[in-house]
Amino acid sequence: MQYYQVLISAEIRPQGLNILEHLLSKRLAFGGPVFSGPAKFLWKGEIVEQDYCFVVTYTREDLKQQLIEEAEKVSVEQVCMISFIRFEANQALVRLLDETFAERETASSPPKHTEAMAALTFVPSSEIAFRTKKSLDLPIPVTAYFSADKSDAQAISECFTENAVVKDEGHTYNGRAEIKQWKTSSSKKYQYTSEPFACEQEGGKTVVTSRLVGNFPGSPVNLRFFFGLEGNKIASLEINT
């Protein structure tokens, strides 16, 4: 499916936010920022200077005409300028758009607002790039794994199926007993914290990237965890850099 980046004009930010809110309620746009700043236009033979803003969002090819109609319906401008830009995107963005617009085929009601807002905390600048985790939506067994990793080896082993396989640092561990021993040994060698910050699907596996910080050589490091899931348990795990 072809997607488009969409630019929609608005005179002031509240108008732009109102247009975007309306399109989101109709599931016609993915969402995005509303930018504003100084602008100049050639309007009816004169150069006009004013602050101006644009909604920047994404939509699906088959929704373009409906988006135009709905945006023009709520716009208060004499001319609501709407442009569509074909673009190439990374796989993660395409999957996100696929999942978002797939929901409109089965949704029976408008999307609800989440009662949340950004909160400022002061952290070391080196950690800023790894702080956004709200949207990970990790599968249940993967969440259990990273939670158990903060406790003990027994809790880790219980996240796996009886005959699970783990591959780490060139070694393979078969079954819960060996997996428990693997975590026991690594916990004795190093102390660390693991904070997942990205999750995607790749080749049938759930791939989580996590930031590890501890007393091991090369700390900090980002590791990729390739989880093979079986129900609410982990059937396989391979850890790579």
Image (cartoon, rainbow, N blue to C red):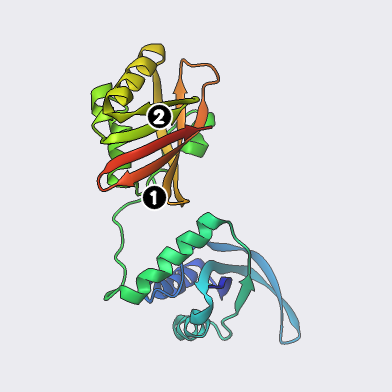
Q: Residue at x 39, y 73 (%)?
A: 27
Which x, y percent locates residue 53?
57, 68
**Residue 109 drawn above or below residue 167:** below
Q: Residue at x 47, y 72 (%)?
A: 15
Residue 124 makes an appearance in the image: yes
Given residues 113 and 36, the one toward you in this image is 113
* Residue 135 - label: 1
Instruction: Report helix, strand or loop for mark 2.
Output: strand
Which x, y percent locates residue 162?
25, 34
Which x, y percent locates residue 83?
61, 77
Q: Residues within 10 Å of mark 2 (few under 14, many from 20)?
A: some
* Residue 80 - label: none
Which x, y percent locates residue 84?
61, 75
**Residue 44 drawn above or below residue 134:** below
Label 1 to label 2: alpha-carbon separation: 17 Å
87 left or right, relative to 55 = right
Residue that carries the numbered disc 2 in the rendered image: 194
Given residues 116 and 111, the one toward you in this image is 111
Q: Residue at x 46, y 15 (%)?
A: 215
Mark 1 or mark 2: which comes first in sequence? 1
Q: Residues within 10 Å of mark 1 (few under 14, many from 20)?
A: few
Instruction: Report helix, strand or loop for mark 1.
Output: loop
Quarter of the image for residue 233 reads: top left
Q: Residue at x 27, y 76 (%)?
A: 108
**Residue 215 drawn above or below residue 168:** above
Given residues 21 and 108, the one toward you in this image is 108
Q: Nearer the viewer, mark 1 or mark 2?
A: 2
- Disc 1 marks which amino acid? Ser
